[in-house]
Amino acid sequence: MTAEKTSPLHAPMQQFPAAQGQLIVGGMPLTQLAARVGATPFYAYDRGLLTQRVAALRAALPPAVKLHYAMKANPLPALVCHMAGLVDGIDVASGGELKVALDAGVAPHEISFAGPGKRDGELRQAVAAGIMVNVEAFREIDALAAITRELGLPARVAVRVNPDFELKSSGMKMGGGPKQFGVDAEQVPALLGEIARHGLSFEGFHLFAGSQNLKAEAIVEAQNKSYELALRLAEHAPAPVRFLNLGGGFGIPYFPGEQRLDIAAIGANLAALARRASTEMPSATLVIELGRYLVGEAGIYVTRVIDRKVSRGQVFLVVDGGLHHHLSASGNFGQVIRKNYPVAIGNRMGATEKETASVVGPLCTPLDLLADRMELARAEPGDLVVIFQSGAYGASASPQGFLGHPAVVEVLV
């Protein structure tokens, strides 16, 4: 594991203000919020910041482009309900997520379902609900045709395309080369023929080249290539393209040295693509699908200091939360080079007495490390450690059953 002595190079965490030494979340001082929640550790998501992020993004995007929320980033039902009132649609990745989206009141015609291993039961749910299935395999065509006959309802489908290019500089590549996601671009014409043969309701294409990208030029290049590929594939489609999901991939800064994404450049390029689509694919609506970018910076993870230990000169703040709640902040079980998320002592904001300390959890493994030798305000038992950038892929993406500790609480404030 690599050591980082300080965190001055993190992008400034200015979304949450501070007053009288306290971080303010949802208009409430952190210690008051902790008392309201009733226990630590917990995740808190600020609904005001969620609203502001969507509004700022809308201002940068052309009105013709629809905005979808990828629920996998954070499926907390209360948060999904809030997001449903802000975005144009929801993208789900399981039957369970579909239920949450429908319960949140999202219009079925604005829900899409992606994933490489959809079970027949989930496909039946999708057809019965009237949502759109992003087809990722020839097998799904046969299953959907049978379900259409069984239910007497038309299956709405788009084709998820595995493109012949990657999103450069992405944290996770979702397309290009051999992938379990989508149908290889060269096989799509044959798949479109099967859709036509079975009489399914074809609506468009879904392309998602990668995620967690902080380089606007890479996202612009991927969106342009995705559009051109969809335009070529549309020549083989059984009906005009009505839906073109260009994916997302917008990143947020987690680690020292990372800078925020230039949304203006991406918005300008999408405006140009929308103008082209108005003549080249006049029936099509362009969509971008974002998860982390919409919710990641609006959330914090809060854990309380249980003990302060000094071992051979190194300070350890032992807290009541850890990798079982926030796997990514700990370094994903040591499978990647670990870097520190932005961290602060949330009830000692602006404190002048600093020290270099490591924040460790209660689990019986050295991998339970939330901050490695960071410069923090001097903390004592009872103080509250805050991990920023925690609104996405936190509680639901962590092994909460690991070692039998209590589950984490989540609140929307």
Image (cartoon, grey):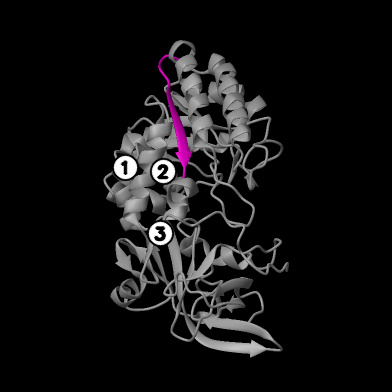
| Amino acid marked by disc 1 | Leu
In front of the other: 194 or 261: 261
- The residues bearing labels 2 and 1 have C-alpha atoms spaced at a distance of 9 Å
Quick check: marks 1 and 3 in contact, CB under 8 Å? no
- The residues bearing labels 1 and 3 have C-alpha atoms spaced at a distance of 21 Å
Residue that badge 2 annotates: 69
In front of the other: 65 or 9: 9
How packed mark 1 is, by other alpha carbons closer than 10 Å (few <14, some 14-19, many 20 or more), is some
Rendered residue at 32%/54% (across/down): 47
Classify mark 1: helix, strand or loop.
loop
How packed mark 3 is, by other alpha carbons closer than 10 Å (few <14, some 14-19, many 20 or more), is some
- The residues bearing labels 2 and 3 have C-alpha atoms spaced at a distance of 22 Å
Quick check: marks 2 and 3 in contact, CB under 8 Å? no
Image coordinates of residue 25 in percent, x first then y, are 35, 63
In the image, the segment drawn in magenta is 281-290
In which quadrant is the C terminus drawn?
A: bottom left
Residue that badge 3 annotates: 16
Rendered residue at 46%/16% (across/down): 275
Residue 288 forms part of the magenta stretch: yes
Residue that badge 1 annotates: 86
Mark whose residue sits in front, 2 or 3:
3
Classify mark 2: helix, strand or loop.
strand
